[in-house]
Structures are given as C-alpha cells and as structure tokens.
Image (cartoon, grey):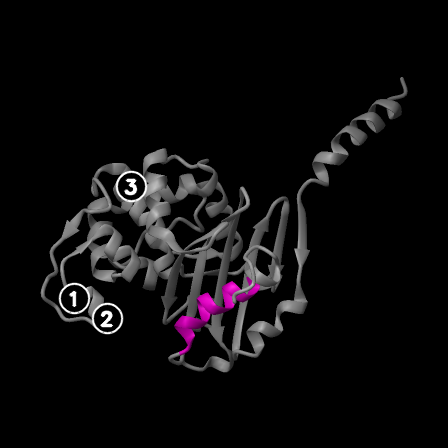
Amino acid sequence: MNHRPLLLALALCLLPALSFAADTTRPDLAPLFAERGLNGCFVVQKGADTIRVNTQRAATAFRPASTFKIVNALVALESGVAPDTDFLLPWDGVTREVAAWNHNLTLEQAFRASAVWYFMEIGRHNGRERLGAAMRALAYGNADASGSDKFWLDGPLRISADEQVRFLDRAARGEVPFSTRNLGLLRRMMLLDKGPDWALYAKTGLATRGGGVDDAPVGWLVGFVERGGATCPFALNISPQGGAAPGADFGPARLELARALLAKLGVLPPKE
C-alpha cells in the first residue's frame, strides 16, 4: 500500500502549526549594550515571535537575584503565609545599606524596595520544600532551593533569560497553579510605569556573583508589557564588560536599556 499521499496530506496539515512560532535574532541591537560598557542579552515574546539579542547568553543560566521575589511572593500569597500585600513584618532593628529597608514593611513595600531581609523571612515561612515544588511546577530554572536563606542571591538556583520569559508568559496568561486573585496582586506589585495605552510590569534583580561561567555580577529586569490588548513578556540581563565592578549607573541601566530595546522593537512607544 502506498502511504505517500497520506503522509503528504499530514505534512501539509501540520505546516501551519509548525510555522506558527518564530525565532528572530537581532544582532543589530547589540551595540545598545556595548555603548554602555555592558555584556548582556534581551528576550521578548511578541505575539508568536520570540526575539533575542545575544542568543547564546539568553540560554545561559544565572542566579535570579531579586527577580525570584516574584515566585517567593506568589507562594506566600497562595499558601496564606501572607494573606494580602499589606502583610506586615517588623524590622529587626539592624541598619542595612538601603534606607528603605530600615523599618517595618508590608509585602508590597518590600517587593518594591526589594528588601532582602523581608523575603528571607518570607522564604523561611514558605519553606524550602514548598518553594522547590512551586519552582518545579513553574519550570523555573533548575528549581534548586538549597543553600542559605538568601539562596536566590548566593545559592545554586539558576535560570536563563529564555526560561524567565517562558515562566512570565505562562504567569501573564494565568496558566500557572496560582489563583487569579494572587496573580492579580502580583501584577499590582509589579506595575512600574504606564501610559495612555500601555503598562510596564517588572522586577529588578542584582547579584554581585551572577553564577555564570565567570561568576561576574549580573543585573536583571524581567516582566511584561501590556499594550493594545497584547501581552509581551521580556527578560534582560547585563554584566559589566571586562570583569569590571558595577558602577553607580549599573542599576539604572537595567530599566533604561530595557525601555530602549522595547521601544526599538515596537513593544513600547518611544520615550518622549
């Protein structure tokens, strides 16, 4: 029996599905990193197209740093450890390097200030087993919750920019094992900026030892843009070129560079 006509028909039926997802590499945008003295990568999901700047680095796993607070906060809300974003923890009286950390904080205040002490305490209440199970369910990097009480900064947990975008895409769509209420609360905490027809949701991260091949510092900005009924998840990570220590402009460069890339790609309007 000749199966060729049947196989040809099946191939033709599958062709639209196979061509639906696209991958685009934009090396022309790499100078935006170099002119700022940075190595880095950028990934954004725009419709069916995944657009990358520096494909190799986008697939490289680093410590998530404070971008892990997205997961830590979600688990706390879902488990009831934090009943709401107003959940208050008392300051322990230890003066730390960021003034905004040195007082009692709610979950939302701690998320926006990226207060490490608060999320160390939240992580202890969540428990390693629960955090590990959540990361496995979310396909969040290597899902390794071992190490110190700030394992997202100095432990074995690793995640790539590609994995960050896949996780954020599912979270923005509500395709993760968390309630609609708690995803909505997370969205509110992540709101960074908005305009007439767009909103930018994001979380920063900074690890002095990024956990990559050379363990250079790594800065993150991950999140998603809502504009015109579309949701575009993205992830950016950067390191100083030549093994240099991060300067005063390293932290602000995360948002400034991400906004420039999102505007170049038509995800955000040009900044006026």
Does 254 appear in magenta?
yes
Q: Is residue 35 left or right of residue 102?
A: right
Return the x and y of residue 225 as percentages of the image width and height: 49, 51
> Which amino acid type is marked by label 1?
Asn
- Name which of mark 3 and mark 1 comes first in the sequence: 1
Marks 1 and 2: in contact by CB < 8 Å?
Answer: yes
Q: In 3D space, how far apart are the residues under numbered discs 2 and 1 (Cα atoms)?
A: 7 Å
Say which mark, if any, is on residue 102: 1
Return the x and y of residue 231 as percentages of the image width and height: 52, 45
Q: Mark 3: which secondary structure?
A: helix
* Nearer the observer, 163 or 172: 172
Q: Residue at x 37, y 46 (%)?
A: 187
Q: Is residue 165 left or right of residue 29?
A: left
Q: Which SS type dominates the magenta stretch? A: helix
Say which mark, if any, is on residue 6: none
Q: In 3D space, how far apart are the residues under numbered discs 2 and 3 (Cα atoms)?
A: 29 Å
Return the x and y of residue 208 as percentages of the image width and height: 36, 72
> Which amino acid type is marked by label 3?
Arg
Say which mark, if any, is on residue 98: 2
- Is residue 156 at all visible to an observer of this figure? no
Marks 1 and 3: in contact by CB < 8 Å?
Answer: no
Q: Mark 2: which secondary structure?
A: loop
Return the x and y of residue 105 as percentages of the image width and height: 18, 56
Q: Quadrant of residue 17?
A: top right
Q: In 3D space, how far apart are the residues under numbered discs 3 and 1 (Cα atoms)?
A: 28 Å
| Mark 3 nearby-residue class (10 Å; few <14, some 14–19, many ≥20) | some
Q: Which residues are magenta?
A: 249-261
